[in-house]
Image (spheres, grey):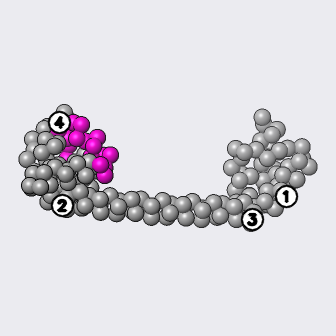
Amino acid sequence: MDTDQLADADFARACELSSDLRELLEKESCTQGKLMDALLLKRNDVHHMPHTVHRRHGGGEYFLYPTESTVRALLPQHGGAEGLAQRLKKKQERAARRSVSMEAKLQAEKAKLQAQAELQAPVRNKLIRALRALGLELRADSARCQAYIDSPGATDLKDVLRTMAHMHWLH
């Protein structure tokens, strides 16, 4: 096999590995960001390739690269299909770690909220019983009641009941 055939085989292998790359190659030209995303490269890896500069309406600029020729030139410089496979594997590993980390954070937050709810349940029940004794009910929009439930020592139950009775009388 000559070098052109090897390069074509490597290019085809890279296209098999990455759906992002296959999607990108459907277009004649692409932006720097799309190229970086598909090949998992950094700005400095891509910027030196031939491109055209376009001005954005309202200021700024963006770079357009001829897609296939740029990909064919960049692949060998960055490990070919094998290098792309390694970068894809690292990306998947990072995503998996983030997913596990995010799941752990969600579990911790859920446990914290559950513990808080368990601590607040007796206070909440005490408030509900006191309100019922006055013919009132706990309102979900009552900041005064919520403040009592969140920190019962900071607010006196009688003050909360007085406020709720007054608000009930007003409305």
Q: Earlier in the sequence, mark 4 or mark 3?
A: 4
Q: Where is 125 relative to 34, above or below?
A: below
Q: In the rendered view, does 127 fall on the left or right side of 23?
A: right
In the picture, which quadrant includes the C terminus? top right
Q: Is 135 inside the magenta-drawn segment?
A: no
Residue bounds of the magenta highlight = 16-33
Mark found first going from the N terminus, 1 or 2: 2
Residue 115 visible from this viewpoint:
yes
Amino acid at dot 4: Glu
Residue found at the far front of this picture: 1
Magenta region's main secondary structure? Answer: helix
Q: Which residue is mark 4?
A: 28
Q: Residue furthest right?
A: 133
- Amino acid type, mark 1: Lys
Q: CA distance from mark 4 to mark 2?
A: 22 Å
Residue bearing mark 2: 78
Earlier in the chain: of badge 3 and badge 1, it is 3
